[in-house]
Amino acid sequence: MRTTLAGLLIGAFVTTFSLSVNADESWSTETGILGWERDIGETAVLLLSAEAGYVLRMYAPGLAQDVDGGRATYHGYWVANSGEVACPVQLIDPLGQATWYWGTFTMSFVHETFPSDWAGTTGDCFEPQNGTISGLSRD
């Protein structure tokens, strides 16, 4: 069984999630709240955290520069602190955290401006993106 972002967002670990950041923007997913944690340059860092200690971050290059409009499709990567199956190589994210649980995603916003829902695809490790994800704006 493979670790996928879609699988992680569908509730493989915990059913009650809480956002541990004061997000300016957040989305409801099938398993909890994904919130805008911070910007690193032009990259938006989105956070999903579980009460049981599970943490997943999505890094979306270009999204932070489009915060006021012009949103479209973004290609990024996700990292998690745990999962079902580890990737064959470890990844160190921009925050300096090393993990064996990571993959890629594509997210497309419905509207060019805030707030907006989005939908996308995910893949784990080096595999093609074959899972689906979505977020409904909470703002």
Image: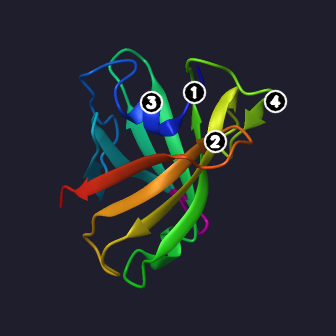
**First in residue order: circle 2 vs circle 3:** 3
**First in residue order: circle 3 vs circle 1:** 1
| Left-right relation of 97 to 26 | right
Query: Badge 4: few (under 14), some or many (20 or more) residues near its Cα, within 10 Å?
Result: few
Mark drawn on residue 8: 3
Q: CA distance from mark 4 to mark 2?
A: 11 Å
**First in residue order: circle 1 vs circle 2:** 1
User: Residue sitting at 26 percent across and 21 percent down?
Assistant: 15
Q: CA distance from mark 3 to mark 1?
A: 7 Å
Residue beneath label 4, please? 89
**First in residue order: circle 1 vs circle 4:** 1
User: Residue sitting at 39 percent across and 37 percent down?
Assistant: 48
Q: CA distance from mark 3 to mark 4?
A: 19 Å
Tell me the amino acid under the disc marked 1.
Thr
Tell me the amino acid under the disc marked 3.
Leu
Tell me the amino acid under the disc marked 4.
Val
At numbered mark 4, what does the secondary structure look like: helix, strand or loop? Answer: loop
